[in-house]
Image (cartoon, rainbow, N blue to C red):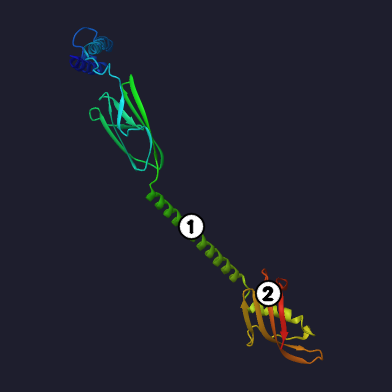
Amino acid sequence: MSNIFVALFLLLAVALVVGLIKPTLVIRWGKNRNRKMVLIQYGLASLLAIIAIGITAPPDPFKDTALAITLSEPTELQFETTTSTLNIVGTVSIPKATLKINGEKVALNENNFTYSRELQTGENKFEIMATYYSSKKDTKEIIVNRILTEEEKVELERQRIEAEAKQKAGEEAKKIADEAKRQAEIEASMPTDTQAQVIAQNFVEYHLNYPDNSEFPGMFDDGAFVVRTGSQYKVEHWVKASNAFGVVKKTYYTIILQYNGGDWADPRNWTEMSFDFE
């Protein structure tokens, strides 16, 4: 019977909307064929239809049934496990109830439900909530502590060792690259053989009796021998200079200079390590 009144209410609702748009379509008689009459007639009829639906509606078959969740799996609400998957199997006392697990709606097969989820390592919480309209509610909470198996522990340790080895290798490679870059920068900043030969002449003059009368060969003359070892330069060449008796003589010399960094043309940035006339 209530279904008849539901259908009647829907027809009245459609007529009410149409009448508010064009009253003459739903009021076929009388002088006052306006929106006010539409509201009075169809509004009152709709209200009576709603009352009739409530009177003729069948009683709730679960009115006296307590809403309860019963779990068959797992059998405990708090436990430890090494398995990676949790299966939750149970029943709800009212088959038309709404069931959610961690906010996710779960379909009921009559009264039965099944829910499966992967477990994360450590604590996992599952809140099971069943509701029936707004009057009935039941909840359960499952707490599962997922612990590692021996195989997983071995695998995690292997991954840790491998990650540490990769990190160490990366750090070592970076260290080597940084050192190579530093050496390249040092190499690029080192004076050339020609520059070492030029600065060597300044130091050679300190060992001459008459440096003002000395004559050094040109930079591109043959005979110069320059060897660099690290930041030390060994220069072998000749100079024409007056000896203690005033006789001009061509003399070969060997000088070792240490470059200390900075402007190569500044003698203060060099240190004489050894000097010898042949």
- Residue at the extreme top of the image, as rendered: 31
Position in image of residue 174 (x %, y %):
52, 61
Which sits earlier in the primary sequence, circle 2 or circle 1? 1
**Mark-to-mark CA distance, 2 and 1:** 39 Å
Viewer-closest of 267 and 148: 148
Residue found 23% across the figure and 30% down from its top: 109
Identified by mark 1, the residue type is Gln
Identified by mark 2, the residue type is Gln
- Crowd rating for badge 1 (residues with CA inside 10 Å; few <14, some 14–19, many 20+): few
Residue found 19% across the figure and 9% down from its top: 29
Residue found 62% across the figure and 78% down from its top: 228
Position in image of residue 167 (x %, y %):
48, 57
Rendered view: 70 above or below 41: below
As helix, strand or loop, the secondary structure at mark 1 comes to helix
Q: Is residue 71 visible?
A: yes
Q: Name the residue under label 2.
A: 258
Q: Name the residue under label 1.
A: 167
Q: Residue 128 occupies which quadrant of the picture?
A: top left
**Number of the label disc, if any, that sits on residue 268:** none
> Left of 158 or right of it: where is 49?
left
Residue found 21% across the figure and 17% down from its top: 6
As helix, strand or loop, the secondary structure at mark 2 comes to strand
Position in image of residue 56 (x %, y %):
21, 12
Viewer-closest of 130 and 161: 161
Viewer-closest of 124 and 44: 124
Q: Residue 98 occupies which quadrant of the picture?
A: top left
Q: Can residue 217 be seen in this view?
A: no
> Left of 240 or right of it: where is 88?
left
